[in-house]
Amino acid sequence: MSVTEGGDWGQGWDATRRWVEGHLAPGERIGAVSALKGGWTSRMRRLDVERPGGADPYALVLRSFVKPFYRRHAPALLAREAGVLRLLEGSGIPAARLVAVDAQGAVCEHPSLVMTHLPGTVRVAQDRDRAARTDLLAAQLAAVHALPVTERDRPRTWQPWTAPERVTVPPDTARPALWARAIEAIRHPAPTHRPCFLHRDFHPGNVLFTGHGPDLKVSAVIDWVETSWGPADLDVAHCSTALALLHGPETALAFPDRYTAAGGRTLATGPTHLYWRLLDALAFAPDARKVAEPWHDLGRTDLTPTLLTTRLENYLQALLDHHT
């Protein structure tokens, strides 16, 4: 076996390899193993599978929860993703097909899920395709929200990722009044809403693209561990915050209109719309740097902690100015 990712593979990896190979067709084996860029909560690896008789090889993706916090939550996260991948088969949503899951880490060195590998790459550059990618993101999110789901197959009810008392204001901020105003705007129960199927972590880092210019298209939506049942506004808000950090508030403010133009669900207006946008944006405090670490690996080294904090604060200001 050729391993191109660094690290101590040891006996733990041997157990994981045997588990994966136990789900392959007779005569197939794992060849090269390489790290995939763009992940933060879990370790993502590409497994190149060799086939007997000179048949063309193919690839799988192995997700493993290694960090202690995520490892503790891995059984629920991986069970949810496995269920969603089964649900999405044949749905028209470009998602991987589930191969196997060891949600408890009973066999593997870490709780793991293996799935098919899909073509494409994460694209977060400031390039000429940026506007077209944003439109494609909006259209793909609208398609996710339109997925018909029976009551039996509904994922868990959405959960907030912050609350007024849990927001940590950056200690060195020069704009404490801005933070206080934003926090005050979410200091009430969540508004009533018409729920739908949510990805819940939909942003440019979880969408793969192929092609350029007129050939640009979404090839896959990945990372379904947070899938939920809740307001479309929440998914739109989450993608908007990521766009604000990547490209600035103007791109983020325009995203809901792009989503609506692409056939998305009717979004809330006024204070209700503001609530969902701020509830998501404030969850990135006090330091948006950790979510940008994978973007650094993809070439966005311009996203310094100072720039990210500035963009987050500028986005909060723009939201408050736009909706109040």
Image: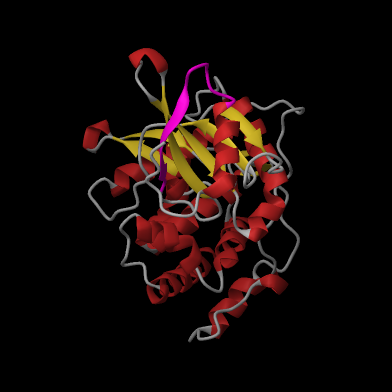
Q: Image height check: is 220 above or below 52?
A: below
Q: Is residue 265 among what the camera can see?
A: no
Q: Quadrant of the N terminus?
A: top left
What residue appears at the point 46 percent right and 57 percent down from the top-left corner? 242
Extreme residue toward the front, this view = 11
Residue nearest the observer in this picture, 16 or 216: 16
**Image position, residue 311 (x, y; %):** 42, 70
Q: Which residues are magenta?
A: 22-36
Q: Is residue 304 among what the camera can see?
A: yes
Task: Let me know if residue 30 is in the magenta part.
Answer: yes
**Image position, residue 32 (x, y; %):** 39, 37
The picture quadrant where one finds residue 196 is top right
Extreme residue toward the top, this view = 53
**Image position, residue 23 (x, y; %):** 58, 24
What residue appears at the point 34 percent right and 54 percent down from the top-left corner? 298
Q: Quadrant of the C terminus?
A: bottom right
Q: Is residue 252 left or right of residue 277?
A: left
Q: Is residue 50 left or right of residue 146?
A: left
